[in-house]
Amino acid sequence: MQLTEVLRNKIRDHTYKPGEMIPSEEKLSKLYQVNRATVRKAIAELIKGKLLYAVPATGTFVSEPEKVTTAISAENKNLTFCWIIKAYGLSVLGPYHMDLLTAIQSELSNNNHLVFQDISKNAELQYSDHWSGYFLIGELPDNIIEKCYSSELPCVFIDSKPCNKMPSVISENYMGAKEAVKHLVDLGHKRIAYIHSDIESFVANERFRGYIDALKESGIPIDKNITAVGDMQVEGGIRATEKILKDAPDITAIFSVNDETAIGALKVMSHKGISVPKDISIIGFDDIGWSRHSIPPLTTVRIFRPELAFYSVELMMNMIERDHNTCAPTISMPTELIIRESTAPAKAGSPKEGVK
């Protein structure tokens, strides 16, 4: 029986009583022998079904009739929210952010709307009296954050963690990166290259920190010659991979800051006749749709975008119903290593061009 049904039955038979806080995600994970991602999904489904409700920075509770009414009231209003992102010169959003944008829009009820605002070209925030709150995505300039915050509208940060403890929903990028690198170490890899981002961001820094700490904990020396900077896109991944192969031809694996970068690495290997994963293993991050269709299918770290969107909207609605100035939690979402065909045990010796 799925965990959602198990918890639903526990609520119906009053094992978990109305108004009572259910066990933490960690406790539920141990009790039912499932990972935290599965627990988070089950709770999200039950919140959507109004059987549970979340109180930010406190816990998740079994719904009472008055709580259900409160939860519904914000959804039934005709609200408009502003999604703010800095696309850093991209002509279109990448697949990760498109998925996230679509997921947030689908989580908003039919009565509520989302307005898109990219501040890449125009650093000035366009303001409207009709907006009810801001979703701020990724790294944004301080002046934009300050304007949003000073507007006294609810602000929810996604994929960033402002130092002033504003409400945010993030994924466990550090732990996801550590798990990915340890997967490579367990396969016998010791020369593991890293392609990181040219943008200083919370997400990129956490993934790089996870890479470094995984190597240190495994007793593998840090070598700056096997790291390179990409641009979070395929072309940047190609350039960074070519640099790494030139500087360190003995690498046996590459961990990339995101999937698009990893796909760039795959293209380089295909062009040079280097077999993946026979000669070099490659791992990405995010689990975008492209990753399962690459050649070979890409091992990656999954970000649960529907759940990320769900908790972002849930947090926003809670802030609207309550005093948003007193609500500043950080909701951290687990990640999951998805093992596909781009990783394999390390091969002795350096990769050779033209070897299939």
Image (tube, grey):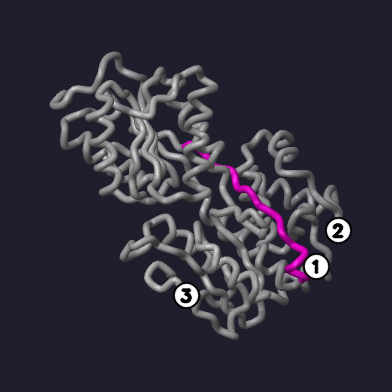
Marking on residue 124: 3
Q: Amino acid at mark 2?
A: Gly
Secondary structure under the numbered disc 3 in the rendered image = loop
Residue at numbered disc 1: 67
Work out which residue is located at the far bottom of the displayed protein and give it: 129
Q: Which residues are magenta?
A: 322-337
Secondary structure under the numbered disc 2 in the rendered image = loop
Q: Amino acid at mark 3?
A: Glu
- Nearest to the eye among marks 3 and 2: give it: 3
The residue sitting at 34% across, 64% down in the picture is: 92
Residue at numbered disc 2: 19
CB under 8 Å between discs 2 and 1: yes
Q: Amino acid at mark 1?
A: Lys
At label 3, counting other C-alpha atoms closer than 10 Å, the crowd grade (few under 14, some 14-19, many 20 or more) is: few
- Per the model, the C-alpha gap separating discs 1 and 3 is 39 Å
Please state the horizontal and vertical placement of residue 202, each as a whole percent of the image: 53, 49
Please state the horizontal and vertical placement of residue 286, each as a whole percent of the image: 44, 46
Please state the horizontal and vertical placement of residue 93, each as a whole percent of the image: 37, 62
Q: Earlier in the sequence, mark 2 or mark 1?
A: 2
